[in-house]
Amino acid sequence: MKKIVVLLGVFFIHTALFSTAQFPDKITYKNTQYKLLTNPLEPFFNEFPEKHPETEIISTALWRGYVASFEIINNELFVVDIEIQYKPEAPDNDHDLQWKSVMDEVFPEQKRVKADWFSGILVLPFGDLIKYKHMSYASVYKNYILLEINNGSLVKERRLNHKKYEKFKQKQYEAFQKTKEYQEMKKVLIDEGSTEEFAETFLKDLLIEYTRRPRED
């Protein structure tokens, strides 16, 4: 139930979230940096909200308030930096925002931290942008790398083109629809005023966030 409450907390900002593309986290994998369409720090901050970095900059393009950088090192997932936006004391204009690291505030005196709290699927898009969608992480890329993580350790890598990735998500969603967790989450959304159509779209778009492991092909 705790995970359901955490995920559905996003519901209360769904209008902005679904109408605005989000700054992604970043990950270095096999010496290449990728966008990361998963947010592995969120389970940590849900467990330890007092650790969440504070920022005065509120942006519809960055509801979580930070951008984290990760790296896979010896088949383990590490947090290597956390940045927030801030406004300099004498900015040239109101939009002159800069980034600063708050890694030491969240994890004092640690250059990198294994993300052993995270189990799930990391989504790394690469290649051409096939279709831009101005909402969350909904844009479609030519290819994807999916990394299955268990307690911060890499279990399996799979590479899919965008068509196979959509089929993967659909299969995951169909399996999730059969679970009690899905029914509970959908009920909460509808009880809070969502239509059934929105509830289903919302849960499908957030699929990767609650996918602990891929269904077997």
Image (cartoon, rainbow, N blue to C red):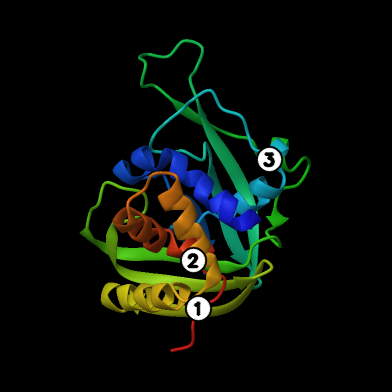
Mark 3: give few (<14), some (14-19) or many (20+) Cα within 10 Å. Answer: few
In the drawing, does residue 21 fall left or right of residue 69? left
Q: Name the residue tied to disc 2.
A: 182
- Residue 80 place in picture, x, y as percent: 63, 51
The amino acid beneath tag 3 is Pro
Q: CA distance from mark 1 to mark 2?
A: 16 Å
Q: Residue at 32% of width from left, 78% of height from top?
A: 167
Mark 2: give few (<14), some (14-19) or many (20+) Cα within 10 Å. Answer: some
Q: CA distance from mark 2 to mark 3?
A: 25 Å
First in sequence: mark 2 vs mark 3: 3
The amino acid beneath tag 1 is Pro
Q: Are marks 2 and 3 in contact (CB under 8 Å)?
A: no
Q: Residue furthest bottom?
A: 217
The amino acid beneath tag 2 is Tyr
Of helix, strand and loop, which one carries label 3?
A: helix
Of helix, strand and loop, which one carries label 1?
A: loop
Nearest the eye: 65 or 26: 65
Q: Name the residue tied to disc 1.
A: 214
Give the vertical position of 21 relative to 99 (above or below): below
Q: Residue at 48% of width from left, 65% of height from top?
A: 183
- Residue 112 place in picture, x, y as percent: 70, 52
In the drawing, does residue 105 fall left or right of residue 124? right
Of helix, strand and loop, which one carries label 2?
A: helix
- Residue 75 place in picture, x, y as percent: 64, 73
Nearest the eye: 61 or 14: 14
Q: Name the residue tied to disc 3.
A: 49
Q: Quadrant of the N terminus?
A: bottom right
